[in-house]
Amino acid sequence: MNVPPLCNVLVTGGGGYIGSHVVLALLDAGYRVTVIDNLSSGFRWAVPPAAYFCSGDVADRPLVSRLIAEREIGAILHFAGSIIVPESVSNPLKYYRNNTAGTEALLECAVSNGVRHFVFSSSAAVYGHPASMPVTEDAVTTPLSPYGASKLMTEIMLRDVAAAHPLNYCALRYFNVAGADPDGRTGQATAAATHLIKVAVEAALGRRKEVVIFGDDYATADGTGVRDYIHVFDLACAHVAALKRLTAEPEQSLTLNCGYGRGHSVLEVLDAIDRVAGTRVQRRLAPRRAGDVAALVADNRRILATLEWKPRYADLETIISHALTWERKLQRLPRDRASADNQQAEVK
């Protein structure tokens, strides 16, 4: 496989949880990185000084076009958007505005300014209730929430744009992202998070009184939902590997699951947090949430075969340990850095 020179990269939503980890991974790999983020849900401090930062919205066509031209952008990695499943059910128009319409504007700028490569932050939510498990990329896509539908709409847009213009793409369908940078450089700073591991480590450190379990009557071994948890560092490295593949194979586009191929139930995760933290997290049962499925586990054979990517932290207790270390560091940050006034909305 030919290895072309590294292109300049624009990262949208680079002040957020996943975006900030990908920025670090890109910088570590030698890329010149530009970040655009309106900071409605991300943090300015999460963008490392080595990256050029622009405060703005991806739907601002003149701004994005100018940024692409001035920074000589050759690839876009797109993380900006809203990702809370229950909120998308109650406020669908927000998701179609932020996720679908915002991405359309971004793609228009990419095409008109000659950007050749696009890596998209998609989601396993596009699958809905899979007919079989683990779920492959070829499974029928029947999302259960506007969040999942908005992600699928972007995948469709990318497919059609790539057929009409000289742009290739990789849609990475995330499963459940957790953990923090192993070196403690960044992590999830959401003040009102609903990601299970984030919520549970907050409870383990006394920042919440309990963890709510949404449903114990699913058709799983212990009745609680089962998910495939992937370390955010491994996920970030998958983005770098995807970008390298796109630049080396400019005629090829990809859709890949990002997971480890094994699932853990809510109760298994909480028991693991008890072990790692050395304390018992209080639990409270509540009804199921709209848009949730019983189990969602990746078939990850395609990404392993396609990209030069090998997970380094595919262990639940390691993921939890890094999340706990970050949470302890976050407690020591000045309030203006960890403030709820600038919280992220990163929850699936």
Image: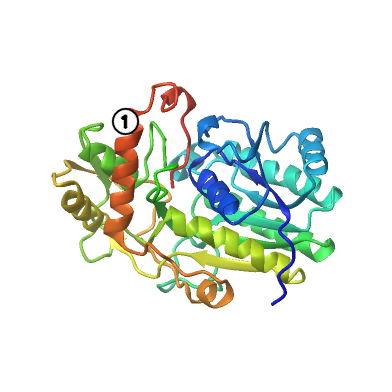
User: Who's the residue at 74% across and 66% down the image?
Assistant: 4
Residue 203: percent from the left, percent from the top? 23, 38
Q: Nearer the viewer, residue 58 or 115?
A: 115
Q: Quick one: quadrant of the N terminus?
A: bottom right
- Which residue is label 1 attached to? 331
Residue 60 seen in this snapshot: yes
Image check: 218 left or right of 96?
Answer: left
User: Who's the residue at 53% across and 71% down the image?
Assistant: 303
Q: Nearer the viewer, residue 59 or 50?
A: 50
Image check: 81 left or right of 189?
Answer: right
Residue 125 seen in this snapshot: no
Residue 9: percent from the left, percent from the top? 69, 50
SS type, badge 1: helix
Image check: 173 left or right of 229?
Answer: right
Residue 319: percent from the left, percent from the top? 33, 55
Q: Nearer the viewer, residue 144 or 112?
A: 112
